[in-house]
């Protein structure tokens, strides 16, 4: 950036150049001077215009760096690369610019090589800046390409180097280490800026904004969303001039909000649309922001906008999963589940290499519908790379068991066991699956198949007493003689006896706690009843219950007789007689206009029937809901 003094000098030099060009319009030195002056004043478009107008005089050998630099500053990165590559002589200035261009194009391997070459072959005061750029390339590789960063052996004496190192650690998932590195970067930044008396506290906070933004991101990754939100909003209040930083922070707040606080998200999304954002962020950052815009449109019920954004994303990256998942989610919100499944199936057919996650989503939709569990199982079993995973086996077995399809559940076990037998025979997962398969088969009466699995387990580990015991138990159900033979392999009771200190056990906390639960009427002097564990009816001294006087009278006398006055039970004396209850098993239809009223809603005896009939007439034809 030009200072005020250099800007004035640039304008004066430009006027001198103009005077020379009036005398000689093709003077090379005057044209070069004019271009440089325009660049110093930030007039990159005008400078490029001069270069392109005088191509015969300002050849690529003379003006290559200035032309490429103007194209770079105008964000015409591909053009800048062509200009640099077309230069006949690669000067140090062009090499420096070449590294910057490669970084913007996200060609990190080539960029790394370019900076290595510059550091190796340069000896000037800009070595620290080159090392900083080198560390930025490594951080980008770790973050966006998931490449394990190499140790550059750089002494992290500046806050920029510390910051880039922290970014590389975040890319590896080493979040605690990254946070410590950012704290060191903050300390170095404060020390560096406080040495300048002209720098205010506001200036320092503005410079620290990007470090604090990365700290908040780590908090978000660690699940500390409240802390992250607080720090993000503090940075926004500072109103930093870096539109890229603001866009990233706004996007991260939107991801925390999800489908809640959408009004705040709609305000924050405006920061992601600021002018120049597309030149400040990487392609993956910009893509993530667009994905979140589509999701926000879905959460705010802007269905058309959601479809438009997700369709645009899909056209840009046809192999990417998220656009089609967003479209499917929008269709589900509109209750178009079949259409959503069809959309996902089309993607899976077109991109089989990326189909695993899509198929998982399809299965989830089938299960959510409740009537397509078997179809969901078929979809899950078509994901070859996940068929042997314990989680997948468990899910499929559970679903098949729910559908009472035991054969298919056992087939799932068998296929997974065969995979491990072929590729990872010594894996603990392999043996665990065999044991689970045996338990499942025993539970569902497949004893012979279970025995085969248990024998395989015992063969793998003949000293496993637990497996042997299971095997003997299984054989006892189908071949008792075989069970007896195998029992000989069990260790003797002497070797299995445990040396237990009975006194210590009785005086332990657990035993003391149990003793406190004795009955309230417990008398230690009285011998407990030996039959106290038997039901009362089964005890030797049980004589049956005494019958009450009233109960004795019921059912006595001749059939149909009663001690109560017959007039009290005369059905003809009541307002209406309810119909008899249907016999168990009979197909009794209940009329919608039945006059039978539940007991607690019945009126006292003697209530007039006329009023009741009037109320029923009023109710007839009335409409109501729950």
Image (spheres, grey):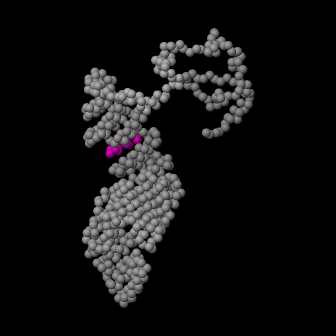
Q: Quadrant of the C terminus?
A: top right
| Near-viewer residue (200 or 442) | 200
In this rendering, does residue 58 appear at all?
A: yes
Quadrant assignment, res 510: top left
Residue 57 in picture, x, y percent from top left: 31, 82
Question: Image point 34% across, 49% down: which residue?
Answer: 352
* Image height of 116 relative to 397, above or below: below
Quadrant assignment, res 63: bottom left
Quadrant assignment, res 398: top left
* Image height of 148 relative to 80, above or below: above
Question: Image point 36% across, 47% down: which residue?
Answer: 356
In this rendering, does residue 456 appear at all?
A: no
Q: Quadrant of the N terminus?
A: bottom left
Question: Image point 51% across, 14% down: which residue?
Answer: 542
User: Is residue 62 left or right of 320 when viewed as pictured?
Assistant: left
Residue 496 in picture, x, y percent from top left: 30, 28
> Residue 376 colored magenta?
yes
| Near-viewer residue (395 or 344) | 395
* Image height of 173 relative to 406, above or below: below
Please provide the residue range marked out in magenta: 375-386
């Amino acid at each position: 950036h030009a200072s005020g003094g250099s800007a004035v000098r640039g304008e004066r030099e430009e006027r001198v150049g103009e005077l020379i060009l009036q005398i000689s319009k093709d003077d090379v030195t005057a044209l070069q001077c004019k271009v440089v002056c325009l660049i110093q004043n930030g007039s990159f478009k005008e400078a490029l215009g001069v270069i392109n107008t005088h191509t015969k005089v300002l050849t690529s050998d003379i003006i290559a760096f200035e032309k490429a630099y103007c194209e770079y500053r105008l964000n015409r990165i591909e053009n800048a690369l062509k200009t640099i590559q077309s230069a006949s002589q690669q000067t140090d200035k062009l090499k420096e610019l070449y590294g910057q261009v490669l970084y913007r194009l996200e060609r990190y391997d080539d960029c790394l090589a370019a900076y290595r070459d510059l550091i190796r072959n340069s000896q000037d005061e800009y070595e620290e800046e080159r090392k900083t750029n080198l560390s930025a390339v490594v951080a980008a590789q770790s973050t966006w390409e998931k490449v394990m960063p190499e140790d550059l052996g750089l002494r992290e004496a500046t806050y920029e180097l510390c910051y880039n190192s922290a970014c590389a650690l975040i890319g590896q998932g080493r979040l605690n280490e990254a946070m410590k590195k950012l704290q060191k970067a903050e300390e170095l930044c404060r020390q560096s800026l406080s040495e300048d008396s002209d720098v205010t506290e506001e200036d320092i906070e503005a410079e620290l904004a990007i470090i604090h933004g990365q700290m908040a991101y780590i908090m978000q990754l660690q699940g500390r969303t409240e802390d992250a939100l607080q720090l993000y909003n503090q940075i926004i209040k500072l109103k930093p001039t870096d539109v890229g930083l603001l866009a990233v922070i706004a996007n991260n707040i939107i991801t925390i909000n999800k489908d809640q606080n959408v009004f705040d998200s709609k305000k924050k999304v405006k920061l992601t649309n600021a002018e120049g954002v597309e030149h400040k962020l990487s392609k993956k950052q910009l893509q993530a922001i667009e994905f979140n815009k589509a999701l926000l449109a879905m959460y705010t019920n802007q269905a058309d906008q959601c479809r438009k954004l997700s369709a645009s994303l899909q056209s840009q990256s046809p192999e990417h999963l998220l656009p089609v998942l967003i479209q499917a989610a929008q269709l589900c919100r509109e209750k178009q589940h079949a259409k959503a499944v069809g959309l996902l199936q089309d993607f899976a057919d077109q991109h089989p290499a990326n189909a695993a996650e899509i198929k998982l989503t399809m299965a989830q939709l089938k299960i959510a519908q409740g009537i397509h569990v078997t179809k969901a199982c078929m979809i899950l079993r078509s994901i070859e790379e996940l068929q042997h995973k314990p989680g997948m086996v468990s899910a499929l077995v559970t679903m098949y068991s729910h559908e009472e399809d035991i054969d298919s559940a056992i087939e799932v076990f068998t296929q997974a066991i065969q995979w491990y037998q072929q590729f990872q025979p010594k894996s603990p997962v392999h043996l665990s699956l065999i044991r689970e398969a045996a338990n499942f088969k025993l539970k569902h009466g497949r004893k012979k198949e279970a025995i085969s699995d248990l024998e395989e387990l015992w063969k793998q580990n003949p000293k496993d007493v637990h497996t042997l015991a299971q095997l003997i138990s299984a054989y006892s159900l189908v071949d008792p003689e075989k069970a007896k033979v195998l029992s000989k392999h069990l260790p003797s009771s002497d070797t299995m006896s445990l040396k237990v200190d009975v006194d210590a056990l009785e005086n332990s906390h657990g035993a003391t706690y149990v003793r406190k639960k004795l009955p309230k009427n417990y008398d230690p002097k009285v011998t407990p009843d030996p039959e106290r564990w038997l039901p009362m009816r089964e005890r030797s001294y049980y004589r049956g219950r005494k019958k009450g006087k009233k109960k004795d009278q019921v059912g006595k006398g001749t059939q149909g007789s009663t001690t109560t006055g017959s007039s009290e039970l005369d059905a003809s004396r009541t307002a209406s007689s309810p119909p008899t209850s249907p016999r168990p098993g009979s197909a009794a239809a209940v009329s919608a206009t039945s006059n039978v009223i539940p007991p607690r809603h019945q009126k006292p005896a003697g209530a007039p029937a006329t009023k009741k009939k009037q109320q029923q007439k009023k109710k007839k034809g009335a409409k109501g809901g729950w």
